[in-house]
Amino acid sequence: MPPLTPSAPAEPPSPPPPPPLTGGRRTARGRRARRARLAAATLLASSASFGLLLSAPVPAEAGSNLVVNPGFEALRSNGEPTCWQKSGWGDNDFTYATTGDAHSGKRAMSVTLTRRVSGDRKALMLEDTSCAPNVTSSHQYDLSLWYKSTTPDASVTVFRHDVKDGWQYWTDLKTLPVSSGYTRAEVRTPVVPPGTDQITWGVSVYGTGTVTTDDFAMEDATQPAPGDVCTAGEACAKGSWAVMPFKNPVRSMHSVVLHNGKVLLVAGSGNDPELFKAGTFTSAVYDPKTGGMKTIPTPVDMFCAGHVQLSDGRVLIMSGNKAYPAADGSHGYEGFKDSYLFDPSSETYTRTNDLNDGHWYPSATLLGNGDVITFGGLREDSTGSVTAERFSQAQQKWLPMNQVNQTWSYWGLYPSMILMQDGRLFYSGSHVFGNGTPGTGASVYDYDRNTVTDVPGLQDKDHRDQSASVLLPPAQDQRVLTMGGGNVNTNPEANRFTDIIDLKKPTPRYAPGPLIPQGTVDQGQGRKPQTGAQGKMYVSAVLMPDGKVLETGGGLHDRADPVFEASMFNPAANTFQSGLATDPIPRTYHSSAFLLPDGRVMAVGDNPGNGSFDDHVSIYTPPYLYKGARPQITSVATDKWQYASTQRVTVDRPIVKAELIRPAAVTHSSDPNQRFVDLPMTVGADGTTIDLNVTSNPNLAPPGWYMLYAVDAAGVPSVATWVHLGGPEAMAPAAAPMVHDFASKMPASAAKKPQEKHTSKTVDTQIAGCDRHYGTENVCVPTKFPKSVPSTTAGRCAWLTSHGYKDLKVNGKDDPLGLDPDRNGRACG
């Protein structure tokens, strides 16, 4: 790969606020042995930060204290501290007290929980214009307090006042370790969203024990943005694409970024029936550092399998292609029960036990405990699978069907199932092939209760085939964006719709987002500007280190008419930056785009209906890499991280944020495990010693390997450093997961119980939108031509010719599309 080319400025980021966060003040659901956790935590009490391996940094002093009555010395007439309030929710027994056991002065505030089933209690700054600290949008603030605690289940929690929507939960910044004596806790907020004029904050206690706090402080710690340094012309704002001088050696359908920085490209037969008949199944491993491609023998046809990275970094691959559709329509694609693990260290596949059912095009979602759950796809007989499957991390095998909760629902093909912060699954409505699920097309699945509750608001739910859905940065915000889509069976022009849902709301529903920007489209006569409502399907969406989402690639119709357009979605503003540089290579069906550890984006694949496959590799250099020198992570105390810990890193110059990004495992526009997890910071006096506060909730960041990025005030990221979150080699956690009461008021009456047990769902053998009366198995003559194509032999044949179809044999005697009027056995011949 060519070297990175730093050099340019770009527009200064000015993110508007995310939508309101309502109601969420719930805490942990976890039921752990508290004595064991308390004992482990007590061993750490002598350390100022749990998980800290170096001495604590000198506190940063950034300016005047913005907290009113920071030491509780002033009292109201009722004896309670001025500008402070008692807050919280749930089923628990608690007491608040103003105590003389102070860090300084005469008073401190204590919160005690003696019994807890759910919820929390907080000592929180009053949500009042005269008490809540005023803040400036786009600034960051250093928060600190002194505390003592007998419970590991306590955290610093922040609320913000939106000038439009009022007070709402913002984020949790730091887990507080047990401490028998007063300890100073410090943390820096993320950038304050536009529209926010005040914040309040305090300590949430969500486990039995007592937390005493005193001497709160809040100081503006804003870093001035660097001056313009970009000299790269258009690339300063648009970035640039380069087509690599080497080719993809396999017809890859699946792309996985491995924790050693290499990329696994899985083809199987690569949608090539001749390779399938020959038993030639392949994968390749690409090394971005050397540009080398290594072909890997592959045991079965993993074409259109499911895949996910396990917590140890191996890749679990489930099912694949047992058979291509029969020309006579007797069966469609068939999925097998085989499952394999790919080991990045040996670059080999080993077989696991079998799934309970076949699943061609299944979902694959990693859960907070490291298990994997999968739904949907086609069975060995071409019918739709209604069997849910669960891979046990502890047992390293697929569980028997009777050990997995079953709703007997058919979720379709590649249903996008995104893990929520409380362990439920959000089905976003993104899928492959045809209509969405019955009802609203989007749902929340509660595995523990085994219920499905529909979520309203998704636009045109039966035209979201090959759309993309992502959990927006940061994962703590619990917002999902769904973009584009079409329908391979009815074959309309793809749409421009986006929909955004805030899963923090008590009754979440999708709301329309901004339309996808338009570019040019090639419908067989060269590129022309898109018009009207023309959008795209086969969308790729990539989470970027600066907190934005790259949207790229796509096509206007089923496996045809590539769209050349790319944009950057800003989650804080809910807007697209249009007009980015576009990949010169078409990227439609069976294409992938994904983030590399160096901050660039790689794109591979294109498999149009005529059966060809594009083997070019493209690399996108984003605008942030033209803004000058990038920050560097110069040291990481350890690469073995645990939940609720504080981890020390050093950087070569000041940064404004750090995050974990889960490496890609993408196919067919789908990567439900893609996520960007914010790491609130505590910054030392030198500005380069940083303590990063890791979430206590594995549902926000499921265990495994992550790319750690540090980002400066100009949005320029470091090269990623690999760290492993969770696992037996890391220190045992002392804190329970902090889980909030989001999406808590979805109507119970709407929750659907399991269907009656049945074997499968009947699925049309032409579900892929291809008429199998013509050509070979990997050629897709559309069952429905675009509306612009005349319904005549001449019109259809002209379209097929312009899209590269050749030598279309008629399979059998039927000619449903009228392509062989002279009956010579050749369509359009």
Image (spheres, grey):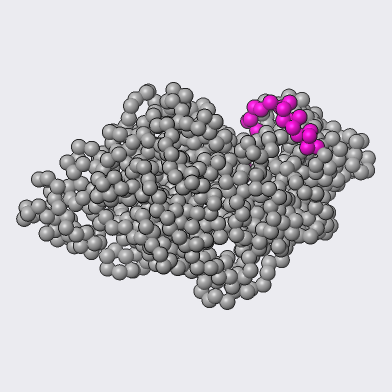
Q: Residue at x 32, y 55 (%)?
A: 607
Q: Is residue 647 above or below residue 406?
A: below
Q: Is residue 348 above or below residue 549?
A: above
Does 820 sit left or right of 349 as displayed? left
Does 780 sit left or right of 9 as displayed? left
Does 505 sit left or right of 650 as displayed? left
Q: Quadrant of residue 116?
A: top right
Q: Residue at x 50, y 60 (%)?
A: 288
Does 49 sit left or right of 754 as displayed? right
The secondary structure that dominates the magenta segment is loop
Residue 137 appearing in the image: no
Q: Position of residue 621 (x, y in %)?
A: 51, 65
- From the viewer's side, name the closer residue of 238 and 829: 829
- From the viewer's side, name the closer residue of 221 and 711: 711
- From the viewer's side, name the closer residue of 513 and 54: 54
Q: Position of residue 730 (x, y in %)?
A: 66, 39
Residue 31 lies within the magenta run? yes
Q: Residue at x 33, y 27 (%)?
A: 759
Residue 316 lies within the magenta run? no
Q: Position of residue 697 (x, y in %)?
A: 63, 39
Magenta extent? 18-45
Q: Is residue 698 above or below residue 826?
A: above
Query: Quick one: which residue is furthest to the front in this view?
Result: 346
- Marks counted in the figure total 0
Q: Position of residue 93 (x, y in %)?
A: 74, 25
Q: Quadrant of residue 829?
A: bottom left
Q: Residue at x 18, y 44 (%)?
A: 327
Residue 259 appearing in the image: yes
